[in-house]
Image (cartoon, rainbow, N blue to C red):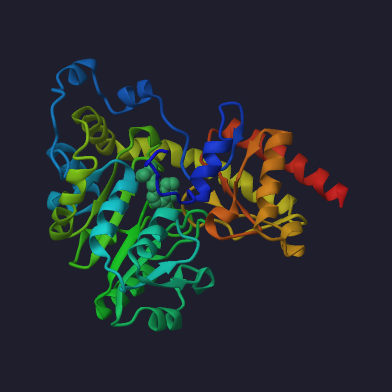
Amino acid sequence: MSILRPRREDPPVLEEWYRRHLAPDVHDISSSGVHPYTFAEIRDLCRIPAEDLDKIVMDDSVSQGGAGIRQAIADRYAGGDAERVLVTHGSSEAIALTLSTLLRPGDRVVVQEGIYHSLGHYPVATGCEVTGLPAAAVRDGEIDPEALEALITPRTAAVIVNFPHNPTGITLSPRGLDALTERTAATGAVLVWDAATAEIAHRWEVLPDPGAAGAHTVSYGTFSKTFGLPGLRVGWAVAPKELLTATFPLRDRTTLFLSPLVELIAERAMRSADVLIGMRAAEARDNLAHLNDWVAEHEDVVRWTPPEGGVCALPVFRELERAEAGPQAVEAFCRELLARHRTLLVPGTAFGAPHGARLGFGGPAACFRAGLAELSAFLRTHKAAR
Ligand SMILES: Cc1ncc(COP(=O)(O)O)c(C=O)c1O
C-alpha cells in the first residue's frame, strides 16, 4: 500500500468553477478583468522592440523584484519609494506571502464578507479570530461609522478589505477611505487593502493607494485586471520594508523570484499604464452603459446595486431570491445557462451570495453583448416556464 496520502481540502468555488466550465467557445461574461491584450499589442503599445527582449540575460532576478519593475510600480503607487514594493507572481502570491507572515493564531481580524477567497483564507488557516465586515455596512462610499467603531477596536490586529469589491463593484469614496484609515491608525490595526481593480472607477475618482504610507498598511495590486495582462502573472504588495523582507524565508522556499523576461515586460507595461488601462476602461464604460439599460429592461427578473468601480457586478435573480433557494440553486442556474446558451457567469456561492452571480463587463463589446443577449433568452424561458 502506498504511504503517499496527500492532505485533501476543498478548492475555492471560484477556481473550481473556472477549471470545470471555462472553455474557448463560451460567451464569457463572468470575469473580474478586462479583455486581455495580445503580446503583439503589448509590444506595440508599450514600445518593446525585439532587440530589447534579445538583450535580456536569462539569469536569476532578486527576491524583492528587479530594480526596474519595482521602481515603475513605486512611481505609480508608492510615492516613488521602491523599498515599499514587493513584486510577485500575481497578487495571489503577494497575499500569500504577506498574510502568512503578518498574521498570528488568535489575532482578531476583521474581514469583509464575500471577499475574494485567498484574502479570506489566510486568517482562517492561521487560526485568527475572524469577524465579518457586513456588506450592508458599506453604503454610498462609506462604512457605517457605528460598524467602524464597533468592529475595529484596539484589540484588532488587521482589517482586510477589497475595494472596488469583487464581485459587487461596491467601493469607498475618498471620504470613506479617509475614515477607514483614520480608524485603523487610531486603533493600531493593520489595514490590508486589495486594490486589484482600483484603476477603473465609476462613481468617485480613483482612490490613492493606502499602502504608500504608514507603518500599518499593506496594499495589493496586479496586472491581471485593469491592465489586461492576466497571463503575465505579475502582481505586487506595497508595504513597509520590514514586512516585505520578513516574507523572504517563505519566498526562498517557494518561488524565489520572477523571470527577468517577465519583469521587463511588466516594467514597460507599468510605464504605459495610462494607455493600457485607458483603452480597456473606455470599453468597460461603454459596456456598463449597455448593462445599465439591460438591467432596467429586465427589472422583473433581476435586481442589482450598480457597480461603483471595477468591471464586475453581482446581479441578483429574483426567482432564486423569492424561492429562498439554497446555494445549489444558483449553481444549477449557472450550469443550465452554460449548457443551453454557452454563456458563463460565476455563481454567487463563490462569494457567499446564494441568489446572484458575478457578471463581468470588461470584455470585448461584441462578445459582451452576445453573452447578455443569451442571458436574456435564458431568463425569458425560465420566466415562461414558471
Ligand atoms: C480581488 C482580487 N485580488 C486578488 C486576485 C488575484 O489575482 P492575481 O493573482 O491574478 O493578481 C484576484 C483575482 O481574481 C482578485 O479578484
* Horizontal relation, residue 363 to residue 39: left or right: right
**The N terminus sits in image quarter:** top left
Q: Nearer the viewer, residue 66 or 278?
A: 66
Question: Residue 283, position in %: x, y?
Answer: 50, 38
* Percent coordinates x, y for residue 158 in the rendering: 31, 70
Q: Residue at x 67, y 42 (%)?
A: 335
Q: Can residue 316 be seen from the camera position used here?
A: yes
- Picture quadrant of residue 242: bottom left
Q: Nearer the viewer, residue 326 or 268?
A: 326
Q: Quadrant of residue 99?
A: bottom left
Q: Is residue 92 left or right of residue 265?
A: right
Relative side of 15 to 100, left or right: right
Above or below: residue 174 compared with residue 198: below
Q: Is residue 199 visible?
A: no
Seen at 17% across and 41% down, the residue is 65
**Residue drawn at 48 percent across, 48 percent down:** 11
Residue placed most toward the observer, 369 or 61: 61
Tell me if residue 370 comes above or below residue 54 in the rendering. below
Residue, x 39% and y 64% (percent of image)?
124
Q: For residue 187, what is the image quadrant?
A: bottom left
Image location (x, y in percent) of residue 225: 41, 43
